[in-house]
Image (cartoon, rainbow, N blue to C red):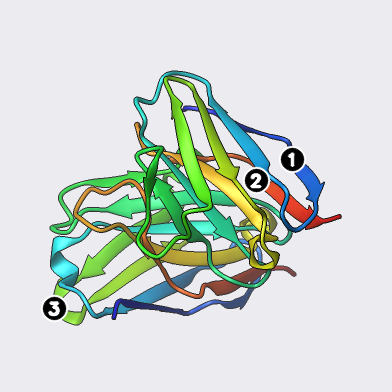
Amino acid sequence: EVQLVESGGGLVRPGGSLRLSCAASGFTFSTYSMNWVRQAPGKGLEWVSSISGSSSYINYADSLKGRFTISRDNAKNSLYLHLNSLRVEDTAVYYCASGPYDSSGYLTYWGQGTLVTVSS
Amino acid sequence: DIQMTQSPSSLSASVGDRVTITCRASQGISNSLAWYHQKPGKAPKLLFYAASRLESGVPSRFSGSGSGTDYTLTISSLQPEDFATYYCQQYYNTPWTFGQGTKVEIK
């Protein structure tokens, strides 16, 4: 059974940094692209970033480029999202998600999400 | 970026009703469209990919159709567990983009 478990969320002050993690199990992690999707309180879904299985291809939402960095460690079956220069509007539940194959754009598997709150 | 526009933003319906949600892309996306639903406090769940391919385990009362820029999700007979928010998503080009959501509420 595929499982994705996010961690690392919490309360951070504006301008601060945070690293989110996603632990994957139940599939051959290194052969699947992975994504981060976020959802602000009471709002819709916003795709954040994706990374291919080999880390060769990385994409970001235009509005987040330069502040967020996606990475993965295939030996640890883990996905990461480094959030820098955080703003109040980055407050959201952050989900990790994957499709059924590398470079899949649709998302079959989702974690339960981790809440990031940016507030002074 | 490709903009995705869903309509309506919300609707009220009764159990047994037929419900249709539409999604329009700002440019052609060649059926690279997924549908999800989401219940409060839960992660989204994939319903369809490639516009009309039903994800395993999704009931057959759900159907997806469309082409080019216009796509439709239909629930033939609304069930209590279908009350949720529905999102479309294009994966034709990065950045992947979602519609704003359609909340299906109990009448």
Q: Dot 2, crowdedness within 10 Å: few (<14), some or many (≥20)?
A: many
Per the image, the residue denoted by label 1 is: B9
Q: Residue at x 72, y 68 (%)?
A: A119
Q: On screen, B9 above or below B31? A: below
Report the residue at 37% width, 56% height from top: B55
Q: Is residue B18 left or right of residue A25?
A: right
What label does residue A75 carry, if any?
3
Q: Position of residue B56 (x, y in %)?
A: 35, 61
Name the quadrant containing residue A28: bottom left
Q: Amino acid at mark 3?
A: Ala
- Tell how many labels: 3
Mark 2 belongs to which amino acid? Gly
Quadrant into which the C terminus of chain B falls: bottom right
> How far apart are the alpha carbons under marks 1 and 3?
43 Å
The residues tagged by marks 1 and 2 sit, at their Cα atoms, a distance apart of 6 Å
Q: Chain of mark 1?
A: B
Label 1 environment density (alpha carbons within 10 Å; few <14, some 14–19, many ≥20): some
Same subunit under labels 2 and 3?
no
- Would residue B21 be found to the left or right of residue B51 on screen? right
**Residue at the (52%, 50%) spot, across then down:** B62
Nearest the viewer among A43 and A58 is A43
Front residue of this view, candidates B11 and B57 = B57
SS for dot 2: loop
Mark 2 belongs to chain:
B
